[in-house]
Amino acid sequence: MAERGYSATKDQLLARLSRIEGQVRGVKGMVDEDRYCIDVLTQISAIQAALDKVALGLLDGHARHCLVGGHGGPSDPAAQADELMAAVGRLMSR
């Protein structure tokens, strides 16, 4: 199996995703309990921020390991920049 840029921090990544999963379940419970809308929205915002941190960590790993380290992705620097910017664009397009 190919090593990915996040392989070194995979356990931390999985732990963070598990916490986010728990937060999502918590929001589901809040909706089920008819909790105050602003409280639910606050929790959703926290989940989005946590997912953004995960995404930025993955993006950092990709840039350092896959692109700079030459362990995957396109070999042409212009294509690397295009790929990286497309990924950033997807993260910012919400």
Image: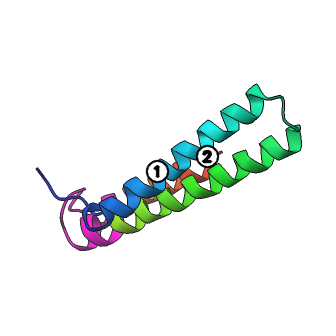
Q: Is residue 36 magenta?
A: no
Q: Does residue 72 appear left or right of residue 88 in this picture? A: left
The residue beneath circle 2 is 23
Residue 75's place in the image compared with 36, above or below, is below
Task: Residue 41 in the image: state x and y as whole percent.
Answer: 79, 44
Answer with mark 1 or mark 2, whichever residue precedes in sequence. 1
Three-letter code, disc 2:
Gln
Task: Residue 85 in the image: state x and y as whole percent.
Answer: 47, 58
Residue 56's place in the image compared with 18, above or below, is below
45 or 29, which is in the foreground? Answer: 29
Q: Which residues are magenta?
A: 63-80
Direction left: furthest residue? 1
Task: Residue 37 in the image: state x and y as whole percent.
Answer: 87, 38
Tell me the quadrant of the picture where the C terminus can be found: top right
Q: Is residue 76 magenta?
A: yes
Callouts 1 and 2 close, C-beta under 8 Å: no
The residue beneath circle 1 is 17
Circle 2 SS class:
helix
Q: Does residue 43 appear left or right of residue 20 in this picture? A: right
Q: Does residue 3 appear left or right of residue 84 in this picture? A: left
Give the crowd class for mark 2: few <14, some 14-19, many >=20 residues within 10 Å.
some
Q: Does residue 21 appear left or right of residue 27 in this picture? A: left
Q: Residue at x 42, y 56 (%)?
A: 15
Q: Specify the quadrant of the image occupied by residue 78.
A: bottom left
Task: Residue 92 in the image: state x and y as whole percent.
Answer: 61, 53
